[in-house]
Amino acid sequence: MSDNSKTDLIKDIRSLLKYQKSLGIDSYPRTEGLQRFLEKREQPSAPSPPSRKYTRLVQVKAAIETREKHVFDPGLAKKATLADVRQELGDCTRCNLHKGRTNIVFGQGSEQAKLMVIGPAPSAEDDHGSAPFLGASGDLLTKMLAAIGLSREDVYLTSLVKCFPAGGQPPKEEEIRTCLPFLFRQIEIICPTVICAMGKQPAQTLLHSKESLFRLRGRFYDFNSFCSTELAEKMLIIPTLHPTFLLDNEEMKKASWQDLQMIQKKI
Ligand code: SF4
């Protein structure tokens, strides 16, 4: 109703009431219709604001999608835990990889780890065992870590995607993009000194690069090429060869050892 129509209606009601008063009518029976008219209409309740943790996940996802620098939030990182992120992930069906998995392989290790190891995706063994880096390549990784004085419990192990890609295929770019916000939340909470990107996909994804792993490996990069803020600037990323590749290419173990020694010095 327009403002003019409302004013006219009020004027009409006023003159009607005046007229009825002049006839001695000064009250009305409280009929059902009048009761309904007088009842306060229920206002639709405002949707409750999303929780801060959820908002954070959306921010991280947006930053990844727009390829903007990921803005770390040290305040939130301190408050949230890996258990919170696991809860946010839930029984995830956000990408097609959920169809082929038996278990979500979220990650394993210390929340205070100085070294975070990121592989491309869980293997079939990881999928069945619900933990990252199991099987023969996991055994080799355990030996590699031991060689620099670390156990699996000292570090945090995870992957770009948390579900086993059926047939052991590398995860697709879209699947990585969908799962990446959860990895970034893990990084944000752990805030390691060094992130070791094991294999081509983790290296290229985390460095926004199309260069081959052989060109990328063997040096540290500031993680702030992806992130801004003081917190992210403290983190370094080093790409290296994946243990599965080393099992088939023993001659490359020397190169891998050089990378490991660089990590040992840094942490
Ligand atoms: Fe969800 Fe990640 Fe699994 Fe895709 S890979 S279904 S995004 S947990």
Image (cartoon, helix red, strand yellow):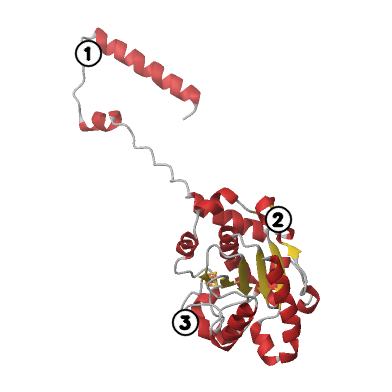
Query: Where is residue 155 shown, x and y percent of the image?
Result: 57, 70
- Specify the label residue 26 is tagged with: 1
Report x, y in % for residue 151: 56, 75
Amino acid at pointer 2: Glu
Q: Residue at x 30, y 14 (%)?
A: 17
Q: Is residue 191 left or right of residue 2?
A: right
Q: Reply above or below: 18 against 119.
A: above
Label 1 environment density (alpha carbons within 10 Å; few <14, some 14–19, many ≥20):
few
Residue 233, which numbered label?
A: 2
**Label 3: which secondary element:** helix
Asked whether the residues under the numbered discs 2 and 1 touch, taking CB atoms below 8 Å apart as contact, a structural biologist would say no
Q: Determine whether 16 is above or below 111 in the image.
A: above
Q: What secondary structure is found at the residue carrying circle 1?
A: loop
- Comparing labels 2 and 3, the label whose residue is closer to the camera: 2
Q: Quadrant of residue 192?
A: bottom right
The residue sitting at 35% across, 15% down in the picture is 14
User: Which label lies toward us, 2 or 1?
Assistant: 2
Q: Which residue is mark 3?
A: 129
